[in-house]
Amino acid sequence: MRDFGFGEILLAAAAVVVAAACVGWLLRKARARRRTQRRADPTNDYAVRRDWERSTGTVNYSSFVYFDVDRDGRYGVGDRPMAGIMVRLFDGEGGFVASTRTNNGGFANFAMSVSSADAAIRAPGAYQFAVSMPPGWRSPSANETQSQDFRLAPGSPAGLASRDLPQPVGLAPARSLAGRMPADGTVTLSVQAVGQVLESLVLAPGLPFRLDLTAEADTVTLAGGGLDRQLALSPYPTDLGLLSPQTHSSAAPLRTIGFDDVTGRGFRKIPCGHAGLQWRNLNAMAQDHTKGSEGYVNGNVSGDHVAYTSSGYPAEFSRETPFGFHSVLLSAAWLKSEGEMALIECWLGEQLVACDQLALSALTPLHYAPMLTAVTRVSLSTKHYWQMVLDDLVLAG
């Protein structure tokens, strides 16, 4: 028997590859011809389907996650879809199958198909959907882990079906109140709910403070040391910054500046004159204008638009005549910048009246409430030049 040399083996292998490529090309051409014939035949334009045995499609099977603003465990009109939340899929034996994050609409999508090798859900059986809880958060809906049984469903788009989709999963961050005391004086801090005092404590001079808030807390009051003020609490973590006699609350009526009236389109640089202010390096953008932008979605609390620091560079808003800077909601734009440090500097003419450093999250806004009586310029920047998101800027005067 003749022995084949190495070169001959290579030639034979190459011939097999070429033949296989030719066969594949011929098959593709034949399928293209049949597809062309079907499309050219008008009798197939609105044909009633008669063969319900085959399933060749792929469907997104979704787990929906939302920010439970009122913490009632139900997805209501005041709640918002959450982006960037990790959801994991496990099989009936607890084996890991796949993971994905929620998109800008709050949906974690897992491909389902009996015909696609790339689908996460390919066979009947029990599957478990587990929402990964951010540290310190909780689920008022108490359903962050759910199971669904899948059965074969010939004729359906994916060939599989379950009795229902997973129920919406509501998430809510821990509410807290933080700030810093000046070097002199003491202050009594009281947390209230519907006019009743829930908690009261004396804040020592020269120290930072932080306390957890119960779900029913709606107001905080500070009294003493010339720092008297009152703040209606938001659903989000709150930071008062450095307290000082220069930052007591103003009696002037408050007005909320949103960014939906800057543009009806997806994006626009905020023009000077908007809301009677001068603006520098701040853009208004629809929350879903940029793909995968978790903080633009989660930092949006009203309407469809937020403001952000353009390309992460220092920005400011100002006016020649003094105005009161009451509060604003601040977020990091991306999960990649979770924990980014923001620097907020507030000026009255050439005098720096407040300077605070704040840790930002792309998952929830921070309610920054310095309650300054009079400023002419507020400067905003981030330590590592990541974008900072703003919404519901509240001013006095």
Image (tube, helix red, strand yellow):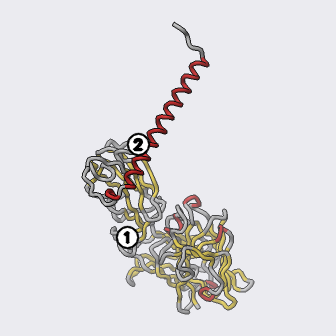
- Frontmost residue, 246 versus 117: 117
Q: In the rendered image of this protein, does residue 206 appear above or below residue 353?
A: above
Q: Secondary structure at mark 2?
A: loop
The kind of residue tagged 1 is Arg
Element type at mark 1: loop
Mark yes or no: residue 252 visible: yes
Q: Which mark is residue 55?
A: none
Q: Please tell me which residue lies in front, 285 or 225.
A: 285
Query: Closest to the observer: 329 or 231?
Result: 329
Farthest residue toward the right? 350
Q: Amino acid at mark 2?
A: Ala
- Residue 295 appears left or right of 194: right
Residue 71 is labelled as 1
Residue beneath the point at 27% across and 55% down = 49
Is residue 46 left or right of 322 when viewed as pictured? left
Q: Position of residue 6 (x, y in %)?
A: 60, 17
Residue identified by numbered label 2: 117
